Image (cartoon, rainbow, N blue to C red):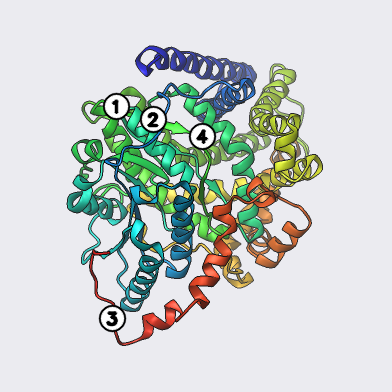
Amino acid sequence: MIDDELGPRRRLILALLVFGGTAAATRVLADVLAVDGLSLPELGILLVFSLTFGWLAYGFWTALAGFFVTLSGRGLHDLKEPVAEPSPAARTALVVPVYHEDPDRVAARLRAIVRSLARTGQLALFDLFILSDSRDPQRIRAEEAAWARLRREAGADCRVFYRNRLENKGRKAGNIADFCRRWGRHYPYFVVLDADSVMAGSTLVRLVQLMEANPRAGLLQTLPQPVGGETVFARALQFAARLYGPVYAAGLSYWYPGRGNYWGHNAIIRSEAFMTAAGLPTLAGRPPLGGEILSHDFVEAALLQRAGWSVWLLPELGGSYEELPANLRGYLARDRRWCQGNLQHVRLLAAKGLTSVSRLHLAMGAMSYVVSLLWFLLLALTTIEAARLYFWPAVGMPAASLFFQPWPVADPRQLISLAWITVGMLLLPKLLPLALALISSARRRSFGGGLRLVRGAAAELVFSVLLAPVLMLEHSRAVLGILSGRGVTWSAQQRDGERESWAAVAASFGGITALGVLWAAAAYLVAPDLLLWLSPVFAGLAAAIPLAALSSRPDLGAAARRRGWFLTPEECAPPVELAELPAALLDAERGGPPIRALASSTGKIPLTLTR
C-alpha cells in the first residue's frame, strides 16, 4: 500500500491524538488556574504550556507507535523487496565532503568501508570521492597524501578520487552540488557520507538493490548509530541513541511511510531525482535568516517529495554508524549551526508545491530549538506568577508567610494529576525501549546483560535530567541570538575526546550556574513548593560546570567502559567494520611513511581525478 492510501490515515490519527490530548491538558490547567481569574502571566502560561505539551505529546505518540511496531515485528515500510543482484549499470558513488578534518581518521574510516565492500564481492560497483573544502595548504597536502595511499590500497576494483574546491560556495550542500554537476550523470546513485561515517558493505549493497527495485524512491535514509565515544558525555549520548533511537525512528517510519526526512549523511540518493528537483534556493535578505541555506537536508527532502519522489527512513537496516561530539561545548557548537539552519526553514513554509508533510517536517525542525525557549518561558512565567501571588495574594487566600505561599487552585488533585501525566509522557519513551530490550534475551546480551542495561539506563536518565536545563538555556540563547541577527561561523567539528579545562568550562557555563543559584533562591523565598517541583531544573543549572568538565574526560569514559557502564551492542559485539578501525588508523600512521610526514614534504602529489 502506498503512502497516498495509508499515510494520510495514520497521520490523521496522530493529529487527533496530539491535538486532542493537548486541548484536554490545556483545559485542565485553565480550570486549575482560573479560581481567582486568569492573570496576564497565567494566560502566558496557558499559551506556552499548550505549545510545549503538544511537542511532548508528538514525541510520546511517536515513541509509542515505534514500540508497538517493533514489538509486533511487522515491516516498517512498503518498499518492494530488493533485487537479488544489482545491475552492473547501477554504478554508485560514495561521496565524502570534508572540511579541515583529520585525514588519518577519515582515511581509516574509508579504508574500513572499502574492505567491507570487498567482502561482499561488489566493490567494483562503487567509486569513492573525497570532496575537500579545506583551505589550509598543509591540511590539503595531508588530504592528498591520504588519498594517494588509499587509492593504492583500494586496487583496481574501486576507483578513489580526490578534489579540492577552489571556492567554498554553499558549504557542504555546495560541495555536493558541485559533485553532481561534474560527475553526477555518470552514477545512477550516490551515497553521502560524513567525515565520521562508517557503513557496512552489505548495507551499501542493499541500499543499491532497494533503489533498483523501487524506481520512484528518491532517497533512502538509514539510521546512523553513534559509536566510538571515548568521554562520559559521548558514551552516555551514544547509549541513549542506541537504546531509544531505533524505537523512535520506527515510530517516524510508521507515521510517515514514503514521506520521511533526510539527515544529510548515510543515505543513498537517486542522482536523476536530486539533480532535477533538489536545487537549493538562496533566501532573500542577509544571514543569519537569509542567504545560503545551512540545514540543506530537510529542504532537499522536501524538494524531492514536491517533484513526486518518495523518501524513506529505514531504521531496521543497520550497518550505519557515525560519531558524536566528545563534550558539551562541542555539542552546543554543532547545535548552534543546526539551530540557525532550522530557523531558516520557517521562511520556506509557504513555498509553492511543498507537501503538507514536508511543511510539517520543516516546522518541526525549527520547533526542536524554539521549544527550549518555550520551556524557559513557561518556567519563567510560573516563577513570576508565584512572585505575584507572594506580594499580592488573591482575595480569600491565607496570609502569606516568609517561606510559604499556597498556590490558589480550584482542585489541587487536578494539578497533581496533570503533573504526573507530563512526567509519564517524558519517561515512557525511555521506559518502553528499555522494556523491549529486557524482554529479549538477545537484546539484553547485546547491551552487556540485563543488570548493566538497567543501571546504564538509570545513569543516563540522571545525566539527561541534569543536562536538559543546560541545553534549554543554551538553545534559548542560540534562538534569541539568531533572531537578533547574530549568525554562526562554519568551522570543523571536534570529533576526538580532548579533555576540557575547568577554566574553559567555567567561562562557558559560569553564567548558567549563577542563574540557577539565584533562580532557586528566589523560588525558595516566594514559593517553596515551586522550588520542590523545579528542583531538577535548578540542580542541572547549578551543576553545569562540573557536569561539563567531568563528562569531557576520556579517562573517566574509559573507566566507565571497563566497568560496564553505557555499553552498546557495537561495543559488546563489534561489527567487523568497527573492529577494523583501530588497526586501520594504526596502519595509516605506521604502515609506510606517515601521512603527516608526507604532508609536510616539499613534493606535492598531483591533484587529479584519475585512478
Instruction: Please report whichever mark, 1 or 3, sits nearer to the chain's N-terminal start.
Output: 1
Mark nearest the camera among 2 and 1 is 2
Q: Assess whether mark 4 and mark 3 are in contact (beta carbons under 8 angstroms).
A: no
Would you name the residue on which mark 4 appears? 315
Task: Inspect the image, locate mark 2, and give the three-letter code of the amino acid beneath it.
Answer: Val
Cα distance in 3D space between marks 1 and 4: 20 Å
Q: Is residue 87 above or below residue 239?
A: above
Instruction: Please report whichever mark, 2 or 1, sits nearer to the chain's N-terminal start.
Output: 2
Cα distance in 3D space between marks 2 and 4: 20 Å
Mark nearest the camera among 3 and 4 is 3
Instruction: Please report whichever mark, 2 or 4, sits nearer to the chain's N-terminal start.
Output: 2
At a point 50% along the width and 75% down the height, the residue shown is 589
Q: Quadrant of the N terminus?
A: top left
Mark nearest the camera among 2 and 3 is 2
Q: Secondary structure at mark 2?
A: loop
Left or right, residue 555 beside residue 127: right
Q: Quadrant of the C terminus?
A: bottom left
Would you name the residue on which mark 3 appears? 604
Would you name the residue on which mark 1 appears? 216
Q: Position of residue 183 (x, y in %)?
A: 21, 51
Other-residue count near label 1 (Cα within 10 Å), few / some / many at <14 / 14–19 / ≥20 = some
Would you name the residue on which mark 2 appears? 83
Task: Inspect the image, locate mark 4, and give the three-letter code of the amino acid beneath it.
Answer: Pro
